[in-house]
Image (cartoon, rainbow, N blue to C red):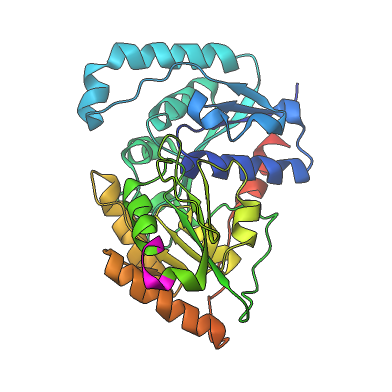
């Protein structure tokens, strides 16, 4: 029986899309569909259904109280581990990789039961709790950002982000009407949606076209304007990226994909809960590396839109190129399953 790989991912596009991109890379290296497994949730599955690999969605415990939540729900977690192990035990899994969140500890323990090599792919500069808890079991922790914090540094390997490589680096045309893309992450953002409404009601809006991804169930904007088009959700961002000149979005791990594509971006870090700390650090990194601009208010956003627009028109925009991790991570996985 061939050696196989299993990916563990849940939730938002930020955790699931890197898995999709790595699967595509492994297929290019010659790995067969039947040798690739994915354990995820129903929310994450929507990004993976067209890949023709084995996808399973068992019930996985999600702690809402950090480490304490895991301790007090040890029997529920054990049930999740048993269920996943039952799915994978006869499949000759030799590599397990997780992209984090609440499924990471389950992935780590299952990898030990299966005697598989365990890898982590961390998308943010400040590692999440799931990956931090699981790091002790990992052979290598692949990082999107340099100097990743809040995790075992001895196992870190900076590869760069895992992005959609079917897209090419964009040439921003200095002539013509510019298009701004607004997106609040895969879940949408009420804050960014409010910014869109303010922007469309400003004098500046007449100079731009606007493409807006609102998030599911958040498309309450009924504006009918010639220069405005909205979508609740896009499974494939290719056309969206191809048609924008400036991006306004969150500062999650996916912000590095826009940097890879050479799209100037204005990032609005999420301001609530544990996510706020890593998004703020991500945003500072993007600004320091000249991949984007961090803003905290609508007035700042309006100012940056004007500044970037002038640079585009004068052909004076320089987004540095970024190293990506698709190939190096896939090749390391390939070593253990080939």
The picture places residue 62, in percent across and down from the top left corner, at 34, 25
* In the rendered image, the vertical position of residue 174 relative to residue 29, given as above or below: below
Q: Is residue 201 magenta?
A: yes
The picture places residue 215, in percent across and down from the top left corner, at 45, 41
Residue toward you, 153 or 201: 201
Instruction: Kindly indicate the quadrant of the structure image that contains residue 269.
Output: bottom left
Instruction: Kindly indicate the quadrant of the structure image that contains residue 80.
Output: top left
Residue toward you, 273 or 235: 235
* In the rendered image, the vertical position of residue 187 relative to residue 199, given as above or below: above
Instruction: Kindly indicate the quadrant of the structure image that contains residue 324.
Output: bottom right
Can residue 338 be seen here? yes
Q: Quadrant of the N terminus?
A: top right
Q: Which residue is drawn at 29% across and 26% down?
A: 63
The picture places residue 261, in percent across and down from the top left corner, at 59, 65
Q: Residue at x 29, y 59 (%)?
A: 280
Is residue 87 found left or right of 189 in the rendered image? right
Is residue 52 found left or right of 99 in the rendered image? right
The picture places residue 314, in percent across and down from the top left corner, at 55, 88
Q: Main secondary structure of the magenta part?
A: helix
* In the rendered image, the vertical position of residue 224 relative to residue 283, given as above or below: above
Residue toward you, 27 or 172: 172
Can residue 144 be seen here? no
Q: Is residue 280 magenta?
A: no
Q: What stretch is highlighted in magenta?
A: 200-204
Residue toward you, 148 or 165: 165
Q: In which quarter of the image is the C terminus?
A: top right
Q: Which residue is drawn at 68% across and 63% down?
A: 168
Is residue 228 found left or right of 127 in the rendered image? right
């Amino acid at each position: 029986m061939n050696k196989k790989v299993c990916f563990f991912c849940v939730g938002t596009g930020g955790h699931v899309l890197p898995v999709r991109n790595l699967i595509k890379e492994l297929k290019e290296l010659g790995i067969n569909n039947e040798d690739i497994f994915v354990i995820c949730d129903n929310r994450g599955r929507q990004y993976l259904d067209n890949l023709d690999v084995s996808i399973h969605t068992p019930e996985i415990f999600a702690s809402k109280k950090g480490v304490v939540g895991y301790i007090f729900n040890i029997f529920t977690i054990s049930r999740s581990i048993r269920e996943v192990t039952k799915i994978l035990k006869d499949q000759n899994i030799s590599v397990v990789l997780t992209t984090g969140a609440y499924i990471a500890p389950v992935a780590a323990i299952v990898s030990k039961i299966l005697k598989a090599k365990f890898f982590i792919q961390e998308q943010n500069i400040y590692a999440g709790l799931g990956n931090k808890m699981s790091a002790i079991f990992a052979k290598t922790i692949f990082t999107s950002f340099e100097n990743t914090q809040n995790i075992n540094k001895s196992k870190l390997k900076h590869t760069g982000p895992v992005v959609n490589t079917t897209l090419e680096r964009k040439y921003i045309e200095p002539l013509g009407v510019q298009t701004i893309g607004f997106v609040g992450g895969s879940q949408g953002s009420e804050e960014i949606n409010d910014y869109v409404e303010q922007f469309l009601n400003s004098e500046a809006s007449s100079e731009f076209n606007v493409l807006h991804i609102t998030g599911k169930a958040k498309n309450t904007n009924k504006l009918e304007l010639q220069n405005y088009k909205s979508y609740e959700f896009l499974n494939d961002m290719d056309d969206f990226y191809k048609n924008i000149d400036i991006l306004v979005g969150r500062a999650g791990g996916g912000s590095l994909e826009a940097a890879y594509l050479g799209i100037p971006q204005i990032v609005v870090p999420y301001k609530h809960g544990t996510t706020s700390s890593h998004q703020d650090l991500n945003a500072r990194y993007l600004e320091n590396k000249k991949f984007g601009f961090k803003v905290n208010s609508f007035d700042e956003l309006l100012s940056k839109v004007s500044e970037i627009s002038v640079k585009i028109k004068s052909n004076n925009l320089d987004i540095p190129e970024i190293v990506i991790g698709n190939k190096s991570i896939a090749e390391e996985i390939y070593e253990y399953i080939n």
